Image: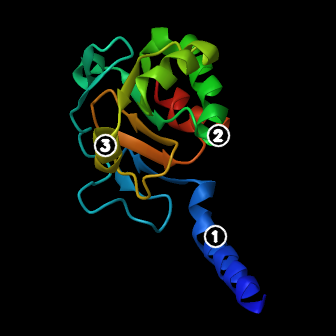
Amino acid sequence: MRAAAAALLVVIALLAAGGGFLLGHSWSIAESGPAPLDTQAAPAAFKPGAKRPPFSLPDLEGRLRNVAEWDGRLLVVNFWATWCAPCREEIPLFVRLQEQFGDRGLQFVGIALDQPANVAPFAAEYGINYPVLVGQGEAIELMRRFGSLYGALPFTAVVGRDGRVAYVHEGVFLPSQAKTQIIDRL
């Protein structure tokens, strides 16, 4: 019994120590150059303010879509999955923002790390009004190339009209972040 209690305490301690990332990690780039918001660095292969990585993934109809389609727009790339509770929490905000600011050059693109058969009904249920692409292993690698530290969902990258990644965030994207990291950039 003592061994089980000790093991439980170790698990709780590990969760508490590592759980900080669940609050969200983000960094931004100021007009004058890179400006990390906290002490954790992006992966060595990625530098804040770098050109967004090129990619092509299939949409829900199976058509291959290339990120270059949205060049010149403020692009918000959101990695998510249907089984991810925090993803379900933030998607209605993204739907509202796309509706309100799409005509001002805002473009959301969702990248689902899920099976297409799961994603299509989910997108319909949530009224997703922006392109949804589907990826598995290649999407996880793409998250890393965008600057994901943990590979956790949701993960969001904001790409300026110049094609440079201006902000990344792991965890739920909050309305206050939408104001400062999306709307204020339009």
**Residue at disc 3, secondary structure:** helix
Q: Which mark is residue 15?
A: 1
| Circles 2, 1 touching at the beta carbon (< 8 Å) | no
Q: Amino acid at mark 2?
A: Ala
Q: Determine which residue is flagged by label 2.
A: 85
Residue 49 in the image: x percent, y percent? 30, 46
Residue 89 in the image: x percent, y percent? 66, 34
Residue 104 in the image: x percent, y percent? 46, 13
Q: Residues within 10 Å of mark 3 (few under 14, many from 20)?
A: few
- Residue occupying image coordinates x 41% and y 17%: 131
Instruction: Choose between 133 and 38: the one closer to the eye.
Output: 133
| Circles 3, 1 touching at the beta carbon (< 8 Å) | no
Q: How is the image coloured?
A: rainbow
N-terminal of the pair, mark 2 or mark 1, is 1
Residue 166, placed above or below residue 130: below
**Residue at disc 1, secondary structure:** helix
N-terminal of the pair, mark 2 or mark 3, is 2
Q: Which mark is residue 1?
A: none
Is residue 179 toward the left or the right of residue 38 in the image?
right
Q: Which mark is residue 137?
A: 3
- Residue furthest to the front: 1
Is residue 14 toward the left or the right of residue 150 in the image?
right
* Marks 2 and 1, how far apart at CA: 18 Å
Q: Amino acid at mark 3?
A: Gly
Residue 106, placed above or below residue 29: above
- Residue occupying image coordinates x 35% and y 18%: 59
Residue 179, placed above or below residue 69: below
